[in-house]
Structure formats: structure tokens, C-alpha cells
Amino acid sequence: MITLLLLTITLGKVVELSKDEFNTLRDSGASMSVVFYAPWCGHCKNLKPEYAKAGAELDGVVDLYMVDCTNENNGGKDLCGEFSVQGFPTIKMINAEKDSVLDYNGAREAKALRSFVLYNMKKPFKDHKTPKVFLEAIKAAKEDGKLHLFIVTESKAASSYLFKLAKKISDRMSIHVLLNSTADRIKELVDGGLEKHVSVGKLSLFTIKKNAMESFNGANTPGEIEKWIDNSAK
């Protein structure tokens, strides 16, 4: 994470940015969730604790940011004009890598904000949309000789822990994920030859390296999962 200037004010896990700091982050290609606000705005005051809560939950995944649209000294006012901010608070998800800006119009609650950020930020893993594509990735992994981690979960959306885990290990292996693994989708995987590695209602993890597959059979806790991954990467 880029080190911000000393002028930056941190509110929990939320960082207030000047225009220069914002531009530095954007130029780096970072994904950013930004609240454009005014100090006198009542809705902004109500949003702050929820936004800070979302920031704390996303710690280690992504930082959340705020820009004061009344601050002329640090360029906040100019920045709000650049993004055509008309009302407060205005929440935007900015992905410089994709050159996209998305407006958030959902509930001003931590859970909804967190889901919005995770859904729209750059993923540190390959999010395979169908069992067929997932099976094709397995076939390719067996042929390239590199270390790959495959994760099958019934969760419909990637959790903040999955993002944290993937960011922590992505320099050591390629990570592949299949979400929303219903019974029908698991059956397709089983029919594709994964009967020893996946089952309905269970978080399944397995590695592939040089055509060898190894499944995780420990307790479903972050500590046990990461210990197994570390051993697999040796």
C-alpha cells in the first residue's frame, strides 16, 4: 500500500485524502472506494461510523477513503468538481486499472458498503463463473507444472477473508475460485473427476502441481488453512 503524506487524516480504517494524494493513488492503479462529503452534512455524519466499520472489516484488503468537498486548501473542493459531485454524501468506486467510476446507491450500512467494494474491486484470484470453466482451469494447471490453489465454496460472493488470503499468497501460487457451489454445480465437478476433492455444503480446497493433487482435510479455520497452504508452497 502506498504510504500517504503526513497531511492524511485517518478515521478508523478510513483515510481522508488531499487531491494530490488521491491522484497518486489513482495513478498507481489502485481500486478506491471514496466518499465525497461536506462536514456540515447530517447524512455524512450518519454515514461515517458505518463507513469506518466497513473499513475495519476490509482491513488488509483495501483502504476506504474520504474527500472533503469544502476544503480548498488541500484540493478537495476541486476534486469534487472534477467528479461532478452534486450532493452529499456521494460514494464512488474508482478502478483506475479498468478506467471505470461506479456510483454507489445502496444502503448506507457497513455490510452493504463492504459487499459493494468487494464485488467491484480488482480480485487477487481467478473467479471462474461456471464448473466447466473451473474444470478447464484444472486441466491447464496440471500441464504447466506450477503451483495452483483451487477453492470451491457455496458462498455466493467472495468474503473479505478470501480476499485477504489471496493477497497474502498470490505471489506464491495462482488462485482459482468457484463461488455459489450448489448441489448441481458440485455434481458437475464430481462428474468431471473431482469426486475425491469436493462435496456438497463443504468448503473445499486443493492444490495442483505437476499433475499431483492434494486436498485440505483439516479444520475449517484460517490458521489451519494457512498452515496447510504454507506447507504446500514449500
Image: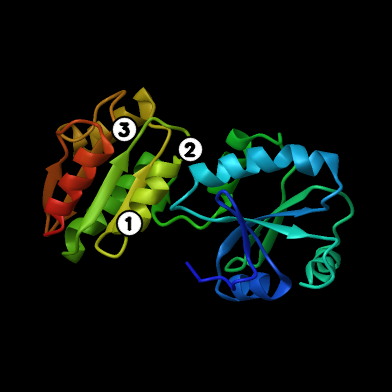
Judged from the image, the secondary structure of the residue bearing numbered disc 2 is loop
Q: Position of residue 11 (x, y in %)?
A: 61, 51
Task: Name the amino acid, label 3.
Answer: Glu
- Alpha-carbon span between mark 2 and mark 1: 19 Å
Judged from the image, the secondary structure of the residue bearing numbered disc 1 is helix
Q: Earlier in the sequence, mark 2 or mark 1?
A: 2
Image mark count: 3
Label 1 environment density (alpha carbons within 10 Å; few <14, some 14–19, many ≥20): some
**Above-or-below relation of 180 to 10:** above
Q: Tell me the number on the disc at residue 157.
A: 2
Q: Residue at x 72, y 46 (%)?
A: 104
Q: Earlier in the sequence, mark 3 or mark 1?
A: 1
Q: Position of residue 52 (x, y in %)?
A: 61, 44
Q: Residue at x 20, y 44 (%)?
A: 206
- Left or right of 181: which side holds 34? right
Q: Residue at x 39, y 26 (%)?
A: 182
Task: Name the amino acid, label 2.
Answer: Ala
Foreground: disc 3 or disc 1: 1
Q: Position of residue 49 (x, y in %)?
A: 65, 39
- Alpha-carbon span between mark 3 and mark 2: 20 Å
To which residue does mark 3 refer?
188
Q: Earlier in the sequence, mark 3 or mark 2?
A: 2
Image quadrant occupied by the C terminus: bottom left
To which residue does mark 1 refer?
168
